[in-house]
Image (tube, helix red, strand yellow):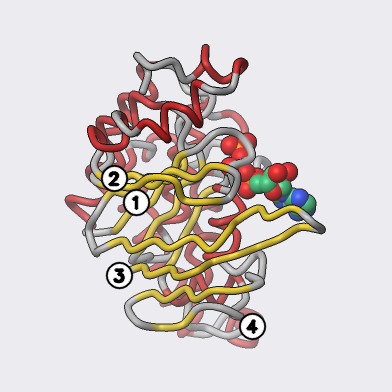
Amino acid sequence: MLSVKNLTKTFGGLLAVNAVDLEVPGRRIASVIGPNGAGKTTFFNMVTGIYKPDNGVVTLDGRDLVGLRPDQVTAAGIARTFQNIRLFGAMTVEENLLVGRHPRMKSSFVDALLHNRRFHEDERQARARGRELLQFVGLDRYRNEYATNLPYGDQRRLEIARALATDPKLLLLDEPAAGMNPRETEDLKSLIRRIRDELGITIVLIEHDMRLVMTLSEQITVLDYGTKIAEGLPHQVRNDPRVMEAYLGRGAAAGEYGKEAL
Ligand SMILES: Nc1ncnc2c1ncn2[C@@H]1O[C@H](COP(=O)(O)OP(=O)(O)OP(=O)(O)O)[C@@H](O)[C@H]1O
């Protein structure tokens, strides 16, 4: 489904992502991991049209995505969440979902101004889909609450629901468990599985929580200094000497990513 070849990005003299290949078949849960600064977010930013790659090819179901704007990438079927929560805090939970739905709405600006039948039908459908998604992620009871008033873990779920409102084929999650307590992380894990199992959406996540990565992923790609150093099933990656060195060879990282965690 997602095919990335030779993807490369430099910032000044720094090779942030260096000729990375990645193939993710449909309905798979894949992870991209690596120490801080390894190039993971830059990689996502190129796949989603935020950065233009210096080199390389990105296709989704055979369609070339390089050069498309982020909104065009969304329309092509890729949704994402960000490392830092990017909700509209002063909007309600439902309104945040409607914003997510916007790329799939058919009515034009003029339809909206005129409040004509097409606009009302579009809005009705968007609200109905939003309700379904809020139920799916377990936030329906907060529908009319301001997003900013939700507990942290629920704000993260709302971001995921908003991404799902764009009807993606592929969902990219950038550190979805960051800042979550163990209970919230467990809930997140089952939500991600349900998104794949029940909605049929392919998932690629960037994550530092190794327990989550190792128990959830069916494919793991490891980046270090912008280069892919390993790829495979969790047990293969965990036992790869290059991966251990990338994590454990750096004093400060050893505590956070100790061998037990890997
Ligand atoms: N816009 C930018 N301009 C210059 N350098 C950048 C830019 N974005 C990222 N970098 C650099 O590119 C490298 C890769 O950064 P990136 O954020 O992709 O890493 P990461 O693996 O996502 O790290 P983390 O796990 O800390 O989020 C880093 O050295 C970073 O400083």
Tag nearer the camera, 4 or 3: 3
Q: Nearer the viewer, mark 4 or mark 1?
A: 1
Q: Give the amino acid type for the residue marked by disc 2 in the picture.
A: Phe
* Residue furthest to the front: 241
Q: In which quarter of the image is the N terminus?
A: bottom left
Front position in the image: 218 or 87 = 218
- What residue do we see at 64% from left, 40% from top? 37
Where is mark 1, residue-wise?
133
Which one is nearer the viewer's eye here, 169 or 247? 247
| Residue type at the position of mark 3 | Met
Q: Kindly indicate whether the residue at mark 3 contacts the one at mark 4 (C-beta within 8 angstroms).
A: no
Mark 3 or 2, nearer chain start: 3
Give the mark toward the camera: 2 or 4: 2
Query: Is the Cβ of the residue at disc 2 closer than 8 Å to that at disc 1?
Result: yes
Name the N-terminal-most of marks 1 and 3.
3
Give the residue pinned by disc 2.
136
| Amino acid at pointer 1 | Leu
Work out which residue is located at the far left of the displayed protein and give it: 197
In front: 68, or 139? 68
Judged from this view, the residue extending furthest toward the right is 12
Q: How far apart are marks 3 and 2 (CA)?
A: 24 Å
Q: Residue at x 35, y 17 (%)?
A: 183
Q: Position of residue 232 (x, y in %)?
A: 27, 46
Q: Dot 3 lies on which element?
A: loop
Q: Does the residue labelled 3 lie within 8 Å of ligand 1?
A: no
Residue topped by disc 4? 109
Task: Please tell me how crowded label 3 is: few (under 14), some (14-19), or many (20+) other residues with Cα within 10 Å.
Answer: some
Query: Which corner quadrant holds the C terminus?
Result: top left
Of the image marks 4 and 3, the number of the one nearer the N terminus = 3
Dot 4 falls on a residue whose secondary structure is helix
> Residue 1 has which mark?
3
> In screen coordinates, is 192 left or right of 58?
left
